[in-house]
Amino acid sequence: MYNRRIFMLGATATAAALGLAACGGEGAGSGGPDTDAAPSEQTVGVAMPTQTYERWVADGNNIKKGLEDKGFKVDMQYAEDDIPTQQQQIDQMVNSGVSVLLIASIDGASLSSQLDAAAAANIPVIAYDRLLTDNENVDFYVTFDNYKVGVNQANALMFGLGLLDEEFKPAGDAPKGPLNVELFAGSLDDNNAHLFWQGAIDTLQPYFDDGTLVVLSKQIDIEQAATQRWEQETAQKRMENLLTTHYNGGEELAGVLSPADPLSRGIINALQNAGLGPTIEEGLPVVTGQDAEIASIKLIADGVQSSTIFKDTRTLADQAILSAESILKGEEPEANDTETYDNGVKVVPSYLLPIQMVLESNYQEIMVDSGYYTPEQVESGQL
Ligand code: BGC
């Protein structure tokens, strides 16, 4: 499929719109890669999900700058978490004849007709961070090690609870439990949410099995724990409900598995509003996170949020650009995982980037000494 498309050069966008793409043919406004064209003659279409999460803004900025520095034109659109908007934006990119598409989807399964149109117009598609599912017209995937994110979130939770030592081995003086924890997941239409969850649950399961950890609410299925569209308010409300329903008789909540920093902050708001904390030292339950957002790094520095996962989106943008360049040259992009990411129709060759766990003990080194955030940004909690 991938090679076929690379060799089907020159199908015009107009022809694609008329359903004639398979006939090929040269013409102005052709979509898809032209291996002879200079970057300045190629436009990369970049579809981004939302600007409400800090990370997607950083991703977009990094991708745009990286592509422009290499001379490419960029058509980048944010869809503000509205699926029809994203569909429309990609339709437009396909119709305007972009050379390649980079797509960070809102709902990974909602773009089938756009992916089919891209294939018909000869335009290769790279899934960016989130897998595009249920469609064969996905050429490549760049992301982080999503399962490992979940494993690390669970390990960070258990470290915060004193069950693991600083090397993440069972702690010698671990509390016997039972310790009450509650679990949050991301949006069910985001394939990543399932991998984060699976990684975390696989890691926590032995502790559930031996009774060290207990989910008092019994909400242990991803459907019960999910947070539609990854919305902070939704997580905050669910945490409030869990507290009033299950922790109103003196039961102690020790920790919360949260898959992303904005959700963590919503959860922390709910906990603090209920009179817990305000810091971990003062009794706030241990709350995990992801994305190393500046507001959460401040909370970690202040001893409020216990951990986050740093995924350097600069490296993801670079990898996406390298992959796009390879595709545009008619070459196979470099993959380091050709097994994990089955999108329901095919296994999509992928490049997975590493992640880092951030705690109070290492945020300075990972986030500040590295130059990613300034001390002033951490102090203010703002970029
Ligand atoms: C990303 C996370 C992000 C979440 C919410 C996931 O697909 O991998 O980094 O926190 O979406 O935007």
Image (cartoon, rainbow, N blue to C red):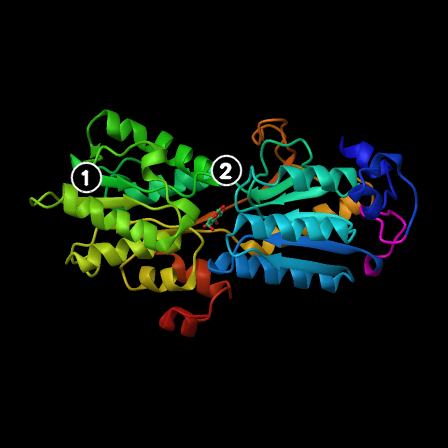
The numbered mark at residue 315 is none
172 to the left or right of 225: left
Q: Amino acid at mark 2?
A: Asn
Gap in angstroms between the C-alphas marked 1 and 2:
28 Å
Say above or below: 271 vs 125: below
Q: Residue 181: x and y, percent?
A: 23, 40
Q: Residue 156: x and y, percent?
A: 33, 45
Q: Quadrant of residue 368?
A: bottom left
Q: Amino acid at mark 1?
A: Asn
7 to the left or right of 300: right
Q: Secondary structure under badge 1? A: strand
Residue at mark 2: 191
199 to the left or right of 66: left
Q: Residue 166: x and y, percent?
A: 32, 45
Q: Residue 70: x and y, percent?
A: 76, 61
Residue at point 27% right, 60% down? Answer: 303
In front of the other: 293 or 79: 79
In front of the other: 63 or 222: 222
Residue at mark 1: 180
Say above or below: 60 vs 377: above
Mark 1 in CB contact with mark 2 (< 8 angstroms):
no
Q: Is residue 104 magenta?
A: no
Quadrant (top left, top right, bottom left, bottom right) of the N terminus: top right
Q: Is mark 2 within 8 Å of ligand 1?
A: yes
What are the residue bounds of the magenta stretch?
A: 28-40
| Residue lying farthest to the right in this orientation | 26
Q: Is mark 1 within 8 Å of ligand 1?
A: no
